[in-house]
Amino acid sequence: MSSSILRLENIGKRYSPDRPALFEGLNLDLRQGEYVAVMGESGVGKSTLLNLLAGLDRPDTGRVLLDGVELSALDDDAATLLRRRAIGFVFQAFHVLPYLSVSQNVALPLDLLSTPSPERAQRIRRMLESVGIEALAARQARHLSGGEVQRVAIARALVHGPRLLLADEPTGNLDARSAAQTLALLRSQIKDNAGAGILITHSRTAADTADRILVLDSAGLSPLRPG
């Protein structure tokens, strides 16, 4: 049986004592190789959930465990280091730096981890080949198409070999063809390079590319389509 990478145990979150909980009783077990989509209405707390998964916010009740480490028990420095080493992010807004080259953008997680130069170059080259943009390595990101920029974002998210990949509406700014290509690439790269992945999305089409679909509401996470 594959090992658990991410575990949520009875998570609850509220922003004020006199307001209802955003959600409570939230449980999840994400195992090696799994790719899960999380859907939900606007305002239900998908962004808050993403912040909890990344250790950027702390639950009011329950525990978030990444490879058995409780994120909320870490101080800020330890949480930052774990996030750099073990988590990759893909955002709707890309956050690719326009005046850096493709290679320089992809290198950013490795720079933060002070990865030695020979390993750094090898990882960048391998990731660019994997997402099909090796010919664009020296091109500035501002000269790329939307689909190419998203490939840079995926390569950057995975270049350091994270255990968990978090994707927040990664195709919201793409046309249908680029979105389909990006979703297929995201799935294949999670399976090949990351331990597991979570896709936060409003789109059922995007969610259908995942192994299972969960719906977030105030009562927790429930399966829309079990794996």
Image (cartoon, grey):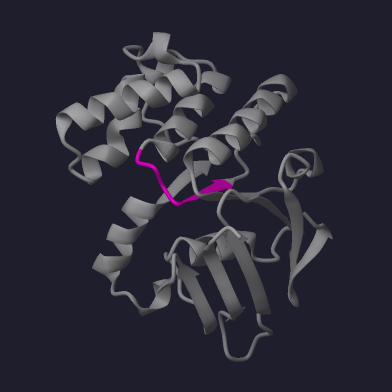
Along the line of sight, the residue nearer the viewer: 35 or 73 = 35
Q: Based on the picture, tell me whether residue 164 belongs to the magenta stretch.
A: yes
Reply above or below: 179 against 82: above
Asked which quadrant contains residue 120, the reply is: top left
Is 115 on the left or on the right of 64, as rendered?
Answer: left
x and y percentages locating residue 181 in the rendered image: 66, 24
> Quick check: 26 above or below 158?
below
The picture places residue 131, in percent across and down from the top left corner, at 50, 23
Among all residues in the image, which is located at the extreme right? Answer: 224
Residue at the outermost top position: 135
- The residue that appears at 80% across and 57% down in the rendered structure is 226
The answer to whether residue 19 is visible is yes
Residue 222: give x, y in percent of width and height: 78, 67
Check the image and name the residue furthest to the front.
1
Quadrant location, the C terminus = bottom right
Foreground of the two, 183 or 189? 189
Q: Residue at x 49, y 44 (%)?
A: 194
The quadrant of the image that shows the N terminus is: bottom right
Does 225 sit left or right of 209 as displayed? Answer: right
Q: Position of residue 61 (x, y in %)?
A: 55, 85
Tell me how many marks there are.
0
Rendered residue at 56%/79% (across/down): 15
Specify the segment rendered in magenta.
160-167
Camera sees residue 92: no
Q: Residue at x 35, y 41 (%)?
A: 160
Q: Locate residue 102 relative to residue 25 in the image: left or right.
A: left
